[in-house]
């Protein structure tokens, strides 16, 4: 019996390792595994309706992330931005917000930041409040009576937030595992992150998803994927590929050395190393030499020198 088990392991193990090693690079490395996770996470109807579904079969969740190391060319046919999680800050939205437009009684419901800002709540013309504040009277929204303990109805009403809460918890665990880097793979692990090539930039996006963790085919240990996928349709910013010239404007206007430095920044020369500086695509032009002051009018000059004379009224003072 023991020899049969050994033979079975000897047959299965090489096939697992080989399958992990020869895995072909996909034109979209995330195809086929994101929707299964989102369905299992229990995404609510409200959350799905307020998210953006892009190509490659990915479902995004309302969020806000700002990242400085990304890859925007990883998926063909997808307007996605894949960013190194260690170079990102942000979170998934879990607060349900009720928004209205002027002179329109209808209510739009979105997931936004805790104070109902950010994301879709920043749309021009919308006035947004938290669900708990906007819903009056409280029993219409299955909220608990004021100044009472959490009720069974309230617990039911918060079930739709579990998906975002779970995503934020997984986000924190992923960031912590990346920072510690304590786990060691067997060497047969094919990392998803290896399919991307990150470059410096500045991206700010309002919709994101977390990929499933990598799993070692031999030890079955799980590793954080190490990146976040952002919906490019909700992103602003870009890569730092433009040559910009930054200088000290005050010294420049005084005619002193402006200390010009060459930096790689965004197209507008206003983000990244150029942030907070005076920058442009060209170095500052040399200031013209100051023009000399015009000669003083002789009459004005005479009047200015009258104080040097000892006059008494309109007559010169007698010589003492």
Image (cartoon, rainbow, N blue to C red):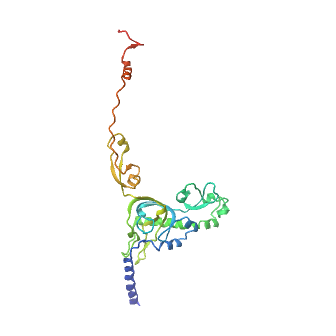
The quadrant of the picture occupied by the N terminus is bottom left
In percent of width and height, residue 25 lies at: 39, 73
Residue sitting at 38 percent across and 88 percent down? 7
Position of residue 244 relative to residue 42, above or below, is above
Q: Is any part of residue 314 visible from this angle?
A: yes
For the C terminus, which image quadrant?
A: top left
Left or right of 167 on screen, residue 317: left
Residue 272 in which image quadrant: bottom left
Horizontally, is 126 left or right of 65 in the view?
right
Residue 36, horizontal then vertical, whole percent: 50, 74
User: What is the x, y in percent for residue 11?
Assistant: 38, 86
Closest to the observer: 186 or 62?
62
Q: Nearer the viewer, residue 281 or 238?
A: 281
Residue visible at 38% across and 49% down in the picture: 279
Residue at 37%, 24% (x, y): give it.
297
Nearest to the observer: residue 26 or residue 114: 26
């Amino acid at each position: 019996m023991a020899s049969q088990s050994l033979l079975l392991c000897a047959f299965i193990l090489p096939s697992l390792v080989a399958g992990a090693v020869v895995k072909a690079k996909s034109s979209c490395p995330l195809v086929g595994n994101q929707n299964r996770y989102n369905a299992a996470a229990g995404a609510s109807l409200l959350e799905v309706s307020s998210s953006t579904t892009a190509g490659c079969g990915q479902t995004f969740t309302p969020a806000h992330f700002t990242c400085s190391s990304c890859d925007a060319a990883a998926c063909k046919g997808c307007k996605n931005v894949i960013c190194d999680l260690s170079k990102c800050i942000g979170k998934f939205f879990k607060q349900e917000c009720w928004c209205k437009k002027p002179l329109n009684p209808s209510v739009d419901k979105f997931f936004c930041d805790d104070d109902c800002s950010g994301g879709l709540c920043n749309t021009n013309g919308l006035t947004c409040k938290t669900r708990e504040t906007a819903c009056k009277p409280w029993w219409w929204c299955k909220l608990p009576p004021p100044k009472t303990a959490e009720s069974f109805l309230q617990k039911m009403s918060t079930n739709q937030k579990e998906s975002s809460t779970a995503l934020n918890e997984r986000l924190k665990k992923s960031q912590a595992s990346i920072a510690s880097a304590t786990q060691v793979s067997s060497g047969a692990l094919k990392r998803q992150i290896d399919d991307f090539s990150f470059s410096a930039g500045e991206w700010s996006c309002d919709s994101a998803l977390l990929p499933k963790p990598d799993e070692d085919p031999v030890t079955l240990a799980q590793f954080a994927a190490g990146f976040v996928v952002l919906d490019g349709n909700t992103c602003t910013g870009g890569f730092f590929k433009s040559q910009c010239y930054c200088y000290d404007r005050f010294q420049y206007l005084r005619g002193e050395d402006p200390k010009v430095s060459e930096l790689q920044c965004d197209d507008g020369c206003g983000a990244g190393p150029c942030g907070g500086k005076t920058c442009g695509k060209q170095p500052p032009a040399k200031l013209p030499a100051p023009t000399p002051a015009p000669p003083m009018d002789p009459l004005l000059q005479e009047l200015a020198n009258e104080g040097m004379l000892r006059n008494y009224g309109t007559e010169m003072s007698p010589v003492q």
